[in-house]
Image (cartoon, rainbow, N blue to C red):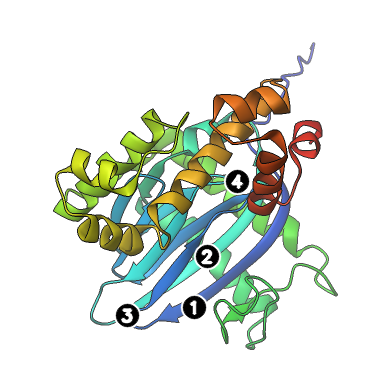
Amino acid sequence: MVWVAHKVEEQIHISEWYSIFQRWFQNGYTFSGESHNFWECLYVLSGDVCVSGDERVYNLTRGEIVFHKPLEVHKFNVTGSAGADLLIFSFSAEGPLTGYLRNKVFRLSDLQQEIMDSLLRYMRSKMPERSECPYPPKRIPDYNYIPLCGKFSSFPQMITSYVCQLILSLADDGLVASTSQAPDALVFSHAINYLTSNIHRQPSVPEVAAFCNVSVASLKRIFEKYAGVGVHRYLLKIKINAAADLLQDGEHVTDVAERLGFNSASYFTKAFKRETGYTPSEFRIQ
């Protein structure tokens, strides 16, 4: 008998973990929003949560999970009267399936929820007690955190196996949830699309408000609600995201700064490092 080897093409590779924790949040809790250069996921164990990621707004309930791609501006607030029990984790990943996960929320099947339940059971078996976590620093105090080092040296690989199993299952048979159609959510989406279309310049807040047919005060309120930052601050984040794509395509720093409407290459470099933690040149190398 002749045995034929079949090469396994890795579809998703998780290379680093930043945090993983479960916590109950009371009704009305609002996470102020952030962006960073790695993936973050929010999985709803119970309750109702409104989540925004870039221009998209979702109303999540039990058994749904959102994937925030690197450099995506994301925010959430708890809308259910009974609060919400959430599992939140963040990691770096590469592979073809990372493109599939972008800009999506999934409603998990019974089998996929069982994968997450198995992950939680493993987490609780390794660290049942409460402890403080260095990430996010002082942002969400007093939550359950699972350390990624120390005597549980196999822990990162074990949780990686569960998350990779989930992602592969979603790619094979994942039910994608739809975005919110609430009036404020639609205005927010229109505003972000307008900013993206005018990324090469600096549109004013009144200009964006007029395009969305709302008052300046309403536009500012909507951005605070879904983004946690002002219009100009959000536009800067859009520019930085676009810059990251251009740099990865091999564009020079000065050309990127000019294309995206920055006053100078030096200002672009400072802004890019403030948002990503890397200079444009360092980012290109990575």
Residue 23, labelled with which disc?
Answer: 1
| Residue occupied by mark 2 | 88
Residue appearing at x 81%, y 69% in the figure = 149
Between 140 and 189, the one nearer to me in the picture: 189
Sequence-wise first label, 4 or 3: 3
Mark 4 and mark 3: span between their CA atoms?
Answer: 29 Å
Mark 1 and mark 2: span between their CA atoms?
Answer: 8 Å
Disc 2 crowd, CA 10 A, few/some/many (<14, 14-19, 20+):
some
Instruction: Measuring from the top left, give residue 75's x and y in whole percent.
Output: 42, 61
Instruction: Measuring from the top left, give residue 274's x and y in whole percent.
Output: 67, 53
Residue 164, labelled with which disc?
Answer: 4
Mark 3 and mark 2: span between their CA atoms?
Answer: 15 Å
Report the amino acid beneath label 3.
Answer: Gly
Sequence-wise first label, 1 or 2: 1
Callout 1 secondary element: strand
Mark 1 and mark 4: span between their CA atoms?
Answer: 22 Å
Report the amino acid beneath label 1.
Answer: Arg
Report the amino acid beneath label 2.
Answer: Ile
| Residue occupied by mark 3 | 83
Residue appearing at x 17%, y 54% in the figure = 215
Q: Are marks 3 and 2 in contact (CB under 8 Å)?
A: no
Callout 3 secondary element: loop
Instruction: Measuring from the top left, give residue 245's x and y in whole percent.
Output: 60, 29
Relative horizontal placement of residue 5, taking residue 80 as reference (left or right): right
Q: Are marks 1 and 2 in contact (CB under 8 Å)?
A: yes
Q: Quadrant of residue 119?
A: bottom right
Between 129 and 28, the one nearer to me in the picture: 28
Q: Which numbered mark, 1 or 4, is in the foreground of this view? A: 1
